Image: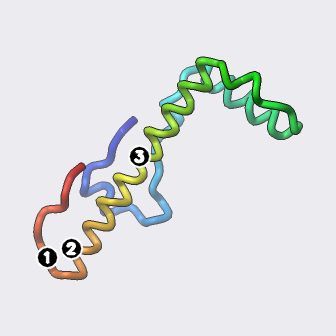
Amino acid sequence: MKLLTDEEAATRSPSNLRIAASTSFTEKEVLALEEITNKLLRGADLRGMARSPEVASIMRKTISMKQAVARQKGRRAARDAAKTTGDDAKEPTP
């Protein structure tokens, strides 16, 4: 997963914070995501998939992606706060 530099994060619009997830998943994880989506669309029960190692891996990656987006938002907020106060101090890095 690629983390943006402070400069890259600063140039992105707020609605454009994202992670390059397409290269983050294995073939088995993609198949598991497809199966989850299909089951949800049909209204099926997902309890049986909870024990799948691929689903556990997907959940760990999802948590990591959410943390990466939160870091990007934090850097953006720090940059915006520095602009409004006129402070030229270097932005904090996580």
Q: Amino acid at mark 1?
A: Asp
x, y (%) of residue 57? 53, 25
Q: In the rendered image, which residue does mark 1 sit on?
A: 87
x, y (%) of residue 69? 42, 51
Q: Amino acid at mark 3?
A: Gln
Q: Amino acid at mark 2?
A: Ala
Vertical relation: 4 (above or below) 48: below
Q: Upstream in the sequence, badge 2 or badge 1?
A: 2
- What residue is at 36 percent from the left and 39 percent from the top? 2
User: Decide: marks 3, 1 in contact (CB < 8 A)?
Assistant: no
Q: Nearer the viewer, residue 13 or 82?
A: 82
- What residue is at 41 percent from the left and 46 percent from the top? 67
Label 2 element class: helix
- What residue is at 38 percent from the left and 60 percent from the top? 73
Q: How dense is the environment of label 1, judged by Cα within 10 Å: few (below 14), some, or many (20 and up)?
A: few
The CA distance from mark 3 to mark 1 is: 26 Å
Q: Residue 63: which numbered mark, if any? A: none
Q: How dense is the environment of label 3, judged by Cα within 10 Å: few (below 14), some, or many (20 and up)?
A: few
Which image quadrant: the N terminus?
top left
The CA distance from mark 2 to mark 3 is: 22 Å
Instruction: Indicate the quadrant where residue 55 lies.
Output: top right
Query: Which callout, 3 or 1, points to the residue nearer the camera?
Result: 3
Q: In the rendered image, which residue does mark 2 sit on?
A: 82
Q: Residue 67: which numbered mark, if any? A: 3
Left or right: where 87 falls relative to 60: left
The CA distance from mark 2 to mark 1 is: 5 Å
